[in-house]
Image (spheres, helix red, strand yellow):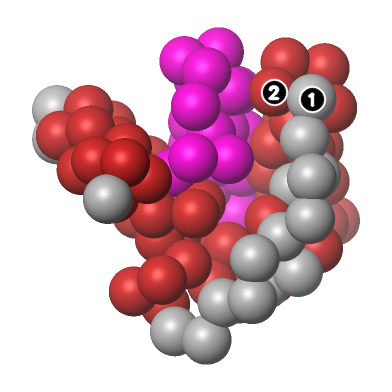
Amino acid sequence: METPRIETYAEFWPHYLRQHARPATRAWHAVGTFTGLGLLGLAIVTARPWLALLAVLVGYGCAWLSHWLVERNRPATFGHPLWSLASDFRMAWLLVTGRLQREIEAASLQDKN
């Protein structure tokens, strides 16, 4: 499936959510994001830069594997790396605060209009 031309982050966010339609994909993203953040914090506290590299590998590894094995689509990172990174943190935050489902439903409604 070809990625639609996206000009703004406001257009990108609903697209990003649609690319993460399956709960397992979102769960793997959350695991990667929070593990990566933990490793990054540990890298800073222990002054071990290799842990920062591991944080990136774990974060992206979990996300990309979920796209290839669960969602069966192309990670949004490849087309919009910065917006995708910001959206990953946004999605993780909404997940832990219990507001993600509302955002997913809103993105789904945009599809129907």
Look at the image and say whether residue 18 sits in the magenta stretch: yes
Question: Is residue 41 at least partly visible in the picture?
Answer: no
Seen at 14% across and 28% down, the residue is: 98
Provide the secondary structure element on which disc 1 rests: loop
**Label 1: which residue?**
72
Q: Establish if 69 lies above or below 111.
A: above
Q: Is residue 105 visible?
A: yes
Q: Is residue 99 left or right of residue 67?
A: left
The amino acid type of the residue labelled 2 equals Glu
**Which amino acid, mark 1?**
Arg
Q: Residues within 10 Å of mark 1 (few under 14, many from 20)?
A: few
Give the number of the disc on residue 71.
2
Residue 89: image quadrant is: bottom left
* Element marked by disc 2: helix
Using the numbered discs, state the Cα–Cα distance from disc 2 to disc 1 in whole angstroms.
Answer: 4 Å
Indicate yes or no whether the magenta region holds residue 20: yes
Q: Which residues are magenta?
A: 17-43
From the viewer's perspective, is 15 left or right of 25? left
What secondary structure predominates along the stretch shown in magenta?
Answer: helix
